[in-house]
Amino acid sequence: MASDERALATWLAARSDDDLAVIFAARGVSPAAGWRDFFDAADGLLDPISIDRALTKLPRAALQALADPAGAPEAPAVSDTLALRSDTGTVFPTVAARVSVLAEATPEAFTPLPDAAPVAGVGEAEAAERAFTAAGALAEILVTARRAPISRTGAGPVSALDRRRLLEADIVDSAEELDDLLAAAEHADLVATDGREFTITGAGERWLEVPTLARWTTVVEGWRDRLPAGLASAGGDILPPAHWAGAYPLDRDWPARAEQSRRIAIRWGLLSLDGGMPEWTPTILAGGDIPTGTIAPHLPAEIDRLYLQADLTAIAPGPLAPALDMRLRRIAIRESRAQASTYRFTPESIAAGLTEGETAESIHAFLAEVSLTGIPQPLDYLVQSTADRHGLVRVSTDAAGLTRVESVDPALVDAIAIDQALRPLGLVADGGALRSRAERSVVFWALADARYPVVAIDAQGSPESLHRRTAPVRSAVTVAPHTAYAPLIATLRARHSDTGEGAWLERELDQAVRAKATLLVTVRLPDASERTFTLEASGLGGGRLRGLDRAADIERTLPISSIVAAVPTDAVPSGRR
């Protein structure tokens, strides 16, 4: 154990700060760990519980490499990110001992999986239909998240309230489907999790506007790129789906994750329920370009025209192109979600579109372009009358940086001032207007949600469109572990000595003092001769070791720089003391 500590401490000290941060994060080290030097770090990482926790994160091939380094394929991640073996590939003996114990207890985890049976093909049309359905359901979820973030529990799944809301809206059929779609969206950076909620990202906003084929490609690429490394074969291909459940044999949570990956593949048309594959899946699992040309002919054709009705509804006789669907839903409420969809125009939906930046002219132009039946007179009147009233409430920022709410209708200002739902804004009278310390966007959306005809005004006094917040796409250059572990790494570096022998000796002496151990201390004298003392270690500080010399019955103080060796007396045969 001592030699392992020493070897690992030296290995850790030679790593860069970034490498150490990655290792500590991979091993689940607390940034507040009370380690004082690299020997403490090595001691902590070689603790049997810590080693076992690291081994559970290893895929089957890596476990084989630890159990049989000569006969198993190389597994770089073992030495690079988990500090289980040296740069030369030598497994630290303490780690090897734990591997032996686990291999004896669960031998099946350290053996190769049998060859997978040949995978049968599957109907491409059926698989494409599932992919189309999944894309539509995910779009509905993202639209919901665009209005307001979807809350989640501390354990990760969607909260019961939002889950029930999405189920009752027939957006998904089950909680499992909802979790799978959100997992796929997170893999593709369409949503981000910030504490207790899912928030649509800028990439998610753009995804809503692209055709279904591009939507499918984005999700499939994200799913494939985020598959754990243990699902890849030595050649880089994704393992056959039949082997996914056994990829991380020591991880008790892995089977559930593997099952979700399989369900996502089924929902997005990559697998059938019995494991069959459509013609495009083998290329995807082999890491090649997404073969859009093979699935495209099987996806339902998207249309770009619809029927406008005098009863203020619009009917799309087939799947509407996503960009048109999103534009239409800015000014209408989608009532049915099927091959033929129905949308309804209401004063509130038109007002919501105006709030998002539409004008009466832009709405008329859009409807005239997509309608097969012209614009019915009732709809034309609804658009114009709503636009005439919209913008009666104006929200701007004054010279002092406060938000100002004003209107040409004093009754509206009075209504806003006494509206109990708006009390958190802290609105106070300012002449014939109201002002608030809350940000302009916060005040704007509070008024819009309360159904006031509000418009945002920019610094030049012109109306502008405001959008609810979106989360940024995950950044690959942000190295969170480095920031989290910077104080701990700085502490380790500060106590590190370039002379490994001296640092190790000081650690041994410190442990002896703590244990009040009796040592055989060999000291090099000024004339280059050596002398050995039997000391009961009592103190260490100022570069000196203090201890009671039993033989002379006096307390000695020895410079650490002069100590050649220090060995506990119980480790020395009685005849050599």
Image (cartoon, rainbow, N blue to C red):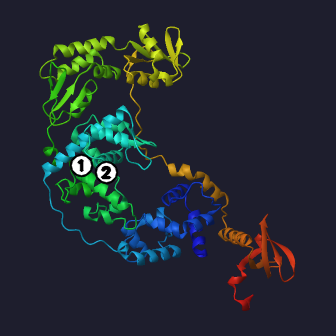
Q: Is residue 392 left or right of residue 551?
A: left
Which residue is tagged 2?
Answer: 223
Rendered residue at 62%/65% (across/down): 40
Q: Are marks 2 and 1 in contact (CB under 8 Å)?
A: yes
Circle 2 sits in a helix, a strand or a loop, which is it?
A: helix
What is the number of the mark on residue 268?
A: 1
Q: Is residue 561 left or right of residue 53?
A: right
| Count of marks placed on residues | 2
Residue 274 is situated, as x and y percent measured from the top left of the image, at: 19, 60
Rendered residue at 37%/61% (across/down): 254
Q: Earlier in the sequence, mark 2 or mark 1?
A: 2
Q: Amino acid at mark 2?
A: Trp
Residue 213 is situated, as x and y percent measured from the top left of the image, at: 21, 42
Q: Can residue 69 be seen in the rendering of this structure?
A: no
**Mark 1 crowdedness (10 Å alpha carbons): few <14, some 14-19, many ≥20:** many
> Which of the 4 image quarters holds residue 199?
top left
Viewport quadrant of the N terminus: bottom right
Give above or below for 424 relative to 241. above
Q: Can residue 28 be seen in the rendering of this structure?
A: yes
